[in-house]
Image: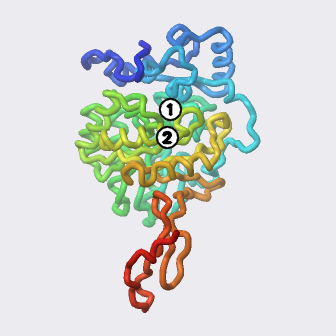
Amino acid sequence: MNSNTESGRDAEIPPHEEGTLLDWKWQLRNSIKNPDKVKEKLNLNDVELNQMKDVVKRYPFRVTPYYLSLVKADDRNDPIFLQSMPAKEENQLYFDVQEDPLGEEHDTVLPGLIHRYPDRVLLTLTNICPVYCRHCTRKRNWKNGEWIRTSKEMDDIYSYIRSDKRIRDVIISGGDPFILCTSKLENILKNIRHVPHVEIIRIGTRCPVVLPQRIDDELVSMLKKYRPIWLNTHFNHPREITLQSRGACDKLICAGIPVNNQSVLLKGINDNVDTMTELCQKLLAIGVRPYYLFQCDPVSGTGHFRTSIFMGLDIIKGMRGFTSGLAVPTFVVDGLEGQGKVPLQPPDYMLSLDYNHAVLKGYKGDVFRYYNPGSGMPAPIQDESNKIK
């Protein structure tokens, strides 16, 4: 099932039938959870296999047949391999990492409900994902077996949302909420949509990337009934944009559901200007807006993926002005212990600002004066003197 083509994309997929590769439930039933099952497919040697097994004792492993088919079998630096296969570095200690660096547990008001910002809450429906991404920020949730929120837990969550009229935005996350059957998801959306002060529902899912078969007509027709819904997904590398993932995004967009992308900056996967520019340009070409580029969180078991913040700044600086502004995501560091997202937007184009004028720098590096309206001073006559050598 491996694809060893140059792009690693568009594996042969038969027409849709129940119980085939294009059936999302078949994909889940046949997900690989044991490293032994990928040994031959990926040409693993015994040392590599044993290292994977050792990691899986601490951090579970799961990959869909579809996503596995994108891996280049003999390339240990393959971006799909690195994101999905357990690595010995997950068991190494890094001084700055911790289980819950963002303080989500502190902001958890009910089981499954995080209330950090005044007007929005984050609902974690499950800890199950089609693929357990090795860089996951909620890796701590993998330890206690797979779970889905109970009906009682959900009723408590609905009551809390109804009781706080400040809440206008509900973010549904996990795990991956699309792991639930469509009827169960609809019941959740219906209950949330019945709350008068909730204006926006957002869904965070990686299914368009790792399980595009899940975005079927039944799901999309159901979601359409509960708009406005905004969907955030998670492409990290251009090779994840395939015929199948493109089709999944197109179905959502054609149903009036905007799709945004939230990438994570990952060492050896997308930590350079060329890769990130290619990814964001290709996302725009399939109608997906590059939204955030996250600095990889200091989560236990993910330290080997973390890059310098300077790398993220350099990537944004290398994109700004050299590609469409729509293609440039906001580079964000998620603050520790509940401090929230901190956007970092290089380069610093405003060098100084006073009552009369600003000194600005263009993307090519030229520096110039810009009159500050509203100062009460007459606007200067624009000439070559405004350019600063």
Residue drawn at x 28%, y 18% is 18
Residue drawn at x 37%, y 59% is 198
Residue 174's tag is 2
**Sequence-wise, which precedes: disc 2 or disc 1?**
1
Residue 303's image quarter? top right
Q: Quadrant of the N terminus?
A: top left
Seen in the picture, residue 316 relative to 233 is either above or below; the reply is below
Q: Position of residue 309 (x, y in %)?
A: 62, 49
Q: Nearer the viewer, residue 300 or 28?
A: 300
Q: Position of residue 291 (x, y in %)?
A: 43, 50
Secondary structure under tag 1 reads loop
- The answer to whether 112 appears left or right of 337 in the picture is left
Mark 2: few/some/many CA within 10 Å (<14, 14-19, 20+): many
Identify which amino acid the numbered label 2 is placed on. Answer: Gly
Residue 57 in view in this figure: yes
Quickly name the residue at label 1. 128
- Residue contact between numbered discs 2 and 1, judged by CB atoms under 8 Å: yes
Q: CA distance from mark 2 to mark 1?
A: 7 Å
Residue drawn at x 47%, y 37% is 275
Q: Position of residue 321 (x, y in %)?
A: 42, 54
Q: Nearer the viewer, residue 69 or 215?
A: 69
Identify which amino acid the numbered label 1 is placed on. Answer: Ile
